[in-house]
Image (tube, helix red, strand yellow):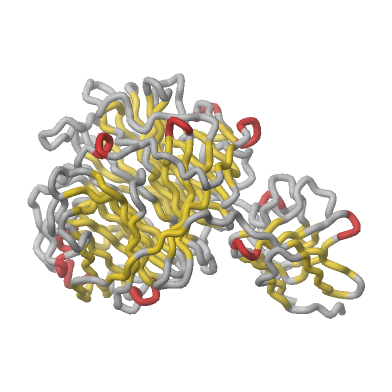
Amino acid sequence: MRSMINFILRSCDGCFCQRKLWGSLLVWIFLVSPVIAIAQIHGTPGTSVFDSVMEFRTIKSLPTDTTKHFHIEPDEEEEMDHNLKPDPSVPVFREVPSTNTSTGNSGSLVALSPAPTVNFTGTTDVQTSIPPDVQGAAGPTYLMEMENERVEILGKTGTAHSTVTESAFWTSMSPNSPYDPRIRYDPYSQRWIALIDDYGESSSSCFYIAVSATSDPTGTWQFHKIRADSTSTLWVDYPTLGFNKNWIVVTGNMFTVSGNTYTASYLWAFNKTSLYSNSVSYTRINMGQTNTMQPAATYDSTQANEYMMQVVNPASALIGLYSISGAVGSESYSTLGYSQGSVDWSFNPASTNTGPQKNTTNDIDLDDSRMQSVVYRNGYIWGVHTVFLPTSSPTRASVQWWQLTTSGINQRGIIDDSVGGISYAYPSICVNSYNDALIGYSSFGSIQYASADYSFRYSCDTLSKLESDYVYQAGANTYYQTAGGTANRWGDYSATVVDPTNDENFWTVQEYASSTSNIWNTWWAEVSPTHNANGGSGTWTWTGGRSTSWFEACNWDKGSLPDASSDVVIPGGTTYEPTITGATGYCKTISINTSNGGVLTVATASSGLLSVAQ
């Protein structure tokens, strides 16, 4: 029996390393460094101004609030500068259109996206708030949905467990008129994270953040109130929420109380360990003027950096990649680089309401092109947002998605109907352990009512291609709600997540037009991909036909990833040789045919690790 050495490669930046595993076999492993951030911005420490602990069963017993809460946001399209000036000292990574982009009609892409395994109704509009701002997350047993009106806990077959109003859920914070909810499930710490703003356009502006005590959302919750601005001259709008192993990250756009003028965007990096222990400690960073910064849901228990994306300059097809890094309590905010697509777009539609619907001339507000959803998985940062095409005089909304590394664009695509007149907006994205992706969104057209849709892609699908649009809940009537204004409000966002029980299946919750006119409802769908199971005993041979990524299933002969019980062979002579970056690769044994040019690169400075069990 061969004698193996147990090892984990952890650091050897910039060096050329040799490891002897058995006999005379020599394994050549390169360790490389990523793009270095040009500038770093530090922040100031802070804590909560009020805290409480409540049982969900107590919240359930509170009386129902039926007061209408129409939160009408300032006209951010006019206030915010949507063509930001890139930092000239930061690298720009340009894509190669012929190899990694797709801009065709969504109906002409590869096979139809798979039908849902399960689908059922979510919350129903009770006409106490517009827009709904739909959010959802999946835990081990329950789904949890939040929107501006209510909080609902459901079983995974659609059985409603509990429904309360937003004001009831946050009652221990003495809320006024909370708005813009967010909800996440952290599968590594097994906690739910909830967020919402309150006291909009007021000197009392604040946000509330809550975490569950366990993986059970029906049990104990810890609530905390954070002042938006210590000077009481700014108020916070459009919060975003992300997490990694070190932090829970919140961002928000800051407006003056007097005049509603956009001034900057702030970031709060919460010490996750402390927050989960019911103690609040954060660093607040002024990021300057942005186009809404979207932090990632980080599906990696070892990733030390929290990545973020934003739209920088639509006219130049630029998006930006950013990070929070450093020791907890001494965080720094950095611009890592800009990625430039080959197709530019308009940040705003031609007019306020441009989403068509059947049997009416009252179109629906499709908002703007800010980044909507970001996920980190297996060394890649994925993002998705609405774009308006063509740039000079937009006639439709489309959904653009990106897959980035810290060195640029791996692939990019657009869900676009340039012929049939269908618009797509309010997208969200998630990625599973196989690197499959699901994008959920709403669709609008003159031949249909506003509907709930998604598009799927297997990791091994052609680069930048999605399987075509699947309408999983068709709209059933016209929709018109303006609260006395001009915008027929929809959105402002949606949710698509991975199920933590197998890290493979997806859930998406989207808005659609109810069978009753002028009513929005939500609908859940579970999408269950089918492929070979990751890991297990046997030999995984690197084929390298897709990319250099160790974490691309289609780079292995079994169409899945090896794990700590798998033997790995790197034969050499393949189109791409493997690289481990941004996460830990696992195997039982590894054999690299160096005589045939076999090479394994481990980017340790980008959190790349290789763990060999024997």
Q: Is residue 382 left or right of residue 582?
A: left
Asked if one can make out residue 231 in the rendered structure from this viewpoint, the answer is yes
Residue 331 x/y as whole percent: 42, 67
Q: Quadrant of residue 21?
A: bottom right
At x 60%, y 44%, the residue is: 410
Asked if one can make out residue 118 in the rendered structure from this viewpoint, the answer is no
Q: Quadrant of the N terminus?
A: bottom right
Residue 103 x/y as whole percent: 53, 29
Location of residue 75 with respect to 121 vertically, above or below: above
Residue extending furthest front? Answer: 89
Q: Is residue 175 left or right of residue 207?
A: left
At x 62%, y 66%, the residue is: 584
Q: Quadrant of residue 453?
A: top left
Residue 192 x/y as whole percent: 35, 66
At x 37%, y 23%, the residue is: 394
Q: Is residue 469 left or right of residue 194?
A: right
Residue 264 x/y as whole percent: 29, 49
